[in-house]
Amino acid sequence: MNLLHLFDLSLIARANEIALEWEGAEFTFGEIERRSNRVSHALRARGLSKGDRLCVYLGNRIELVDIYLACVKLGVIFVPINILYRDREIAHITNDAEPRLVITDADLAELTSDRDDRPLEDLDGDSPAAIIYTSGTTGASKGAVLTHNNFAANAVNLLTMWQITDRDRFLLALPLFHIHALGNGLHCWLAGGCRMRLLERFDHRTAIDEFRDFRPTLFFGVPTIYVRLLDTPPEIAREIGDRMRLFVSGSAPLPVPVFERFRDLFNHTILERYGMTETFMTLSNPLTGERRAGTVGFPLPGISVSIDDGELFVRGPNVFAGYWRRPDATAAAFTDGWFHTGDLATRSADGYYTLLGRKSDLIISGGFNVYPREIEEFLLEQPGVAEAAVVGVADGLRGEVPVAFIVATSFDADALERACRDNLASFKVPRRFVQVDSIPRTALGKVQKHLLAQ
């Protein structure tokens, strides 16, 4: 089977039901099917065929959905490009992927034809569906080759474990160039058959109006979004929470204080999960049961995880096929079939996994391991601290020492140091507290610590 067999549960079986809301218009699943068929024929007319790469540099819009579905139908490999990227970063991806075509806003008017029939292509589950380029926070980004089976296994897991059905109303504001919105959001919508409102982006100025107007039951967010939502007036937050079935957070660690404040404000406990481009969703707190603050829960069905020397390893149908044209990097990423995530983790006695940060972020100070996330979580509990990031800097005596970068409404470095000394081991206390206006992040909220370290 390929992804179309999964999508046809909606595109064909629910053809007359409302599928998508976009910029005030409504589209049925049947209309989505026909729109993507027309794009498929237009792409074939431009010379694209099975195995070709198609780079797409677009923000969220219905045409991006059409193009992705057209690629799935043709066997063309979909290669989304982060719209925040600039010439140098875009050139790296296009030179590496060698696409037959690159689509931008200027090309959309030509991507249509008069044919509504679905093109037929021989595809199986091992056929590549997409190449998603990693964030590239530690060097040039690599293209992760993701198969139909990878996407399908992830969607089936989330539909089952998060009980996503056609009764849900799904508000999607995350960027579709990222695996979070594409692999989780778009695929759960198409396979589950729910009604989705797609937003161009998350805008904190209008977000509350979108929630109140659309009345969603399902929302996927990143920690920075949930921080923004904490500004919601209590009576409106409770109104939104009363209608919601599930808030999910991922793509970056959710600070415990945000988890707790959101629960108190919206009367909803966020479900935090863990995944990455190369593995889709790997761990998740339970839908039914304790959603434990600071943890990412248990392995999803069919997925095996292990911890070796502190690092999390993953094996299962969710794991990607390898890095595009990088056999060296692919070989280095696996040991006996286990994928090296590069993330440090611990497992509790009752099976909950907790992430400690990236292995590359680990600070070794005077022979002691210092996990930045532990310090960051503590700093976020201090009055006036809105954001915190801890990085290691070179030190002649101890090798490395931690330094804290703080975004705060009120800043007192001496008070922060005293609090740390009273509550943390001496080798964990940051040697400097630097106030900054903002902390650099990727489009999905991951802190770019290499920029801070510079």
Image (cartoon, rainbow, N blue to C red):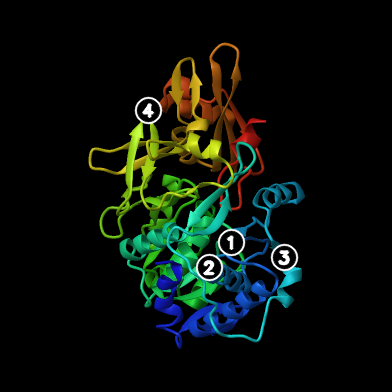
Q: Quadrant of the C terminus?
A: top right
Along the line of sight, which residue is nearer the eye, 422 or 256? 256
Distance between the alpha carbons at the discs numbered 2 and 3:
19 Å
Secondary structure beneath dot 1 equals strand
The residue under label 4 is 309
Q: Is residue 260 above or below residue 187?
A: above
Secondary structure beneath dot 3 equals loop
* Left or right side of 83 for 174: left
Q: Is residue 370 above or below residue 83?
A: above
Q: Amino acid at mark 4?
A: Asp
The residue under label 2 is 72
* Position in image of residue 73 (x %, y %): 53, 71
Q: Quadrant of the N terminus?
A: bottom left
Distance between the alpha carbons at the discs numbered 3 and 1:
14 Å
Residue 295: quadrant of the picture: top left
Residue drawn where x is 43% and y is 82% of the image:
12
- Say whether disc 4 or disc 3 marks the residue closer to the N-terminus: 3
Label 4: few (<14), some or many (≥20) within 10 Å?
few
Q: Amino acid at mark 1?
A: Phe
Along the line of sight, which residue is nearer the eye, 117 or 105? 117
- Say whether disc 2 or disc 3 marks the residue closer to the N-terminus: 2
Residue drawn where x is 50% and y is 25% of the image:
363
The answer to whether marks 2 and 4 mark residues whose Cβ atoms lie closer than 8 Å is: no
The answer to whether marks 4 and 3 mark residues whose Cβ atoms lie closer than 8 Å is: no
